[in-house]
Image (spheres, rainbow, N blue to C red):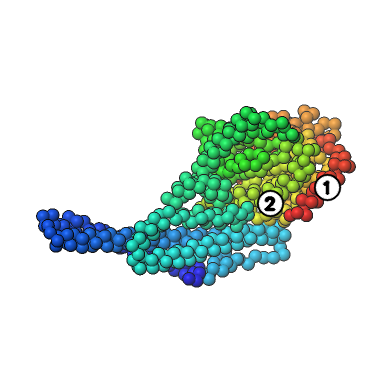
Amino acid sequence: MTALGVGQVRSSRPEVLVGAARRLDACRLDVEAVITRLLRHRARSWSGPASVAAAVRAAALVAGLGRLAACLAASSTSVMQAAVRLRAAQDLLARADARAAADGAFVDHEGTLFLPVRAAGLDSVLEAHGARRDELLRDEVHTYLRQAVRLATDVDTGLARDLLVLARGGPSAGPVLAARGAAAVPAPPVVLNDASGAYASAAWWRCLTDAERRSVIRDHPQWVGPRDGVPAAARHEANLVLLAEAARAAASALAAEQEHPAIPFGVDPVARARARVDDLRAVRALLGRQDGVQRRLLFLDATGREVKVVVAQGDVETADHVVTYVGGLSTTPRDDLGRYDNLFSPLRQQAIREGGGADTAIVTWMGYEAPQPDEIVTSIDRSVLNPKIARDNADELAAFLTGLGAARDRPVHQTLWAHSYGSVLAGNALLQDSPVDDVAVFGSPGVPFDRIERIGLKAGSFNVLAAGHDLVAHPGWRPLGANPDTVAGGTSLSTTALKDPAAGCNLWHGIGSGAEDPARTSTGHSDYLRAGTVSADNLVAVAVGRRDLVVQQAPVERSCITVPTLPPPPAATAARLAASVAASVASR
């Protein structure tokens, strides 16, 4: 059969199929009632050849009626499943229509998306922002349209095939089709780490029935747990299964390494196995906290050299604001997962207050193998001075951010917080299309763009925080990209609370001289998230879209920040690093 069109799917009537399925089931009940009467009223006292012949004939009649009842049952099941799938296809079309309408676009009867005409040549930032929104809209709407048409076509083809088999009346047609229909679950799409992949996964999940969803989580948790675009509750349930499996495998691997220790060459295998156990133990400990806060495991991968994990504090499916935090150098679940959660708890409560009671969820995204301190000189490709890791993992972050919105039934305000090397990764992810509304980078060694038009954010949405005595934010040389403070269209936010702003500072009285309020001032590289500081207040204000609460960095504060810059690397190291960076760029 040829593929159906959008107009045909729209005009289809699943309720007619529902009615037909119910009538078929009513016929099945009638046939079963006849079988019951035949069996109840068969002769019991009659004997002889005629009695045997009558019994044989009655048995054949009952068997035939049984096959008819089975065919009617299978027909009813096939038609009802077709109705459910057809309704799901129409729901996808409705979602595509609603998504288009929200941006002033529409989808015609032929499935063509018409975008609104936008004024050109007025503001380059607005033009770039509109282009990014349009590209995301195309990806989402076209994915839903394709999935809806594909699903409806499969329904049409499959139902015609099943009914033809049943109409031919094969002796086993009914039982075989009934069993096949009960077990059939549409296979998930191939996981693609981009916007279209997240939308395709969201469309696949929306096409499943509740029973099929439960079945997939139970039998194929690996289909659900890592899949961007699937709702957080389902991912959490599936990832708990994967976490238990990973913990058992890690414990067995550690026991084996301890029983037959190998001579270490480079990394101690026992230490690495123990670190994996500790990482997974940290994940379980965080999820097991009994403090009344909802936490969900949105991603887990324990198959690589380091454990990758994503955990949400709060409900990312219903919260009005969702923040995704990306950490940098030396980040590991065993050392940092619980620590970040402790930092985020008061900030989340502050965000809820400043957001007028609107809920805020904060996601700790450790979905990449962060560079470690010992790799700075031992591995050029994994050195924190090389953007390769950031580039290689940017698509995973962009897909995750897209999936958060794709899985929801209503829009969400998304903010990206990125610290240190995590800002390099976030900057590369922003070069892709993702539905991020606001960004704050802090302690950043560099970003891969020099103006916000490159990332399609609206004016005032790219925020930079650089504290005093932060040697990473003020290195003097930028192997990882442009200085975020110099990005055209960006906003520098305050990290300092001066005791007497009117007095100002000079080079002899900078941060740390007593000119600032230490309780409210962030200093160094790792103090930005401390509750009560100006930097934390700014991050919260950005997260809930309260630009009226944002404190920008004033010239007097800038004059107070006196930071010794790092010397450039030795010539040999710089040459090796430059060659590695050039190779990574050429390979993309």
Q: Residue at x 36, y 62 (%)?
A: 173
Q: CA distance from mark 1 to mark 2?
A: 23 Å
Residue 204 has which mark?
none
Residue 182: x percent and y percent?
40, 54
Q: Look at label 1 and name its amino acid.
A: Ala
Question: As drawn, is 576 to the left or to the right of 252?
Answer: right
Q: Residue at x 24, y 62 (%)?
A: 60
From where the camera sits, is residue 538 visible?
no
Crowd tier of the residue under label 2, counting other residues whose Cα lies within 10 Å: few below 14, some 14–19, many 20 or above: many
Residue 193: x percent and y percent?
63, 52
Q: Check disc 1 and report the residue beneath it.
A: 578
In depth, the one of 409 and 33 nearer the eye is 33
- Residue found at the far left of this picture: 45
- Residue found at the far front of this picture: 49
Quadrant hosting residue 551: top right
Depth check, mark 1 against mark 2: the one in front is 1
Quadrant hosting residue 529: top right
In depth, the one of 393 and 566 nearer the eye is 393
Instruction: Say which quadrant the C terminus sits in.
Output: bottom right
Mark toward the start of the polypeptide (1 vs 2): 2
Question: As drawn, is 506 to the left or to the right of 36?
Answer: right
In depth, the one of 222 and 112 nearer the eye is 222
Q: Residue at x 61, y 54 (%)?
A: 192
Q: Look at label 2 and name its amino acid.
A: Leu
Q: Residue at x 79, y 29 (%)?
A: 513
Q: Check disc 2 and report the residue beneath it.
A: 430
In depth, the one of 535 and 138 nearer the eye is 138
Query: Judging from the image, what secondary structure is the residue with disc 2 in?
Result: helix
Query: Judging from the image, what secondary structure is the residue with disc 1 in?
Result: helix
Residue 314: x percent and y percent?
54, 40
Q: Are circles 1 and 2 on residues that touch, CB within 8 Å?
A: no
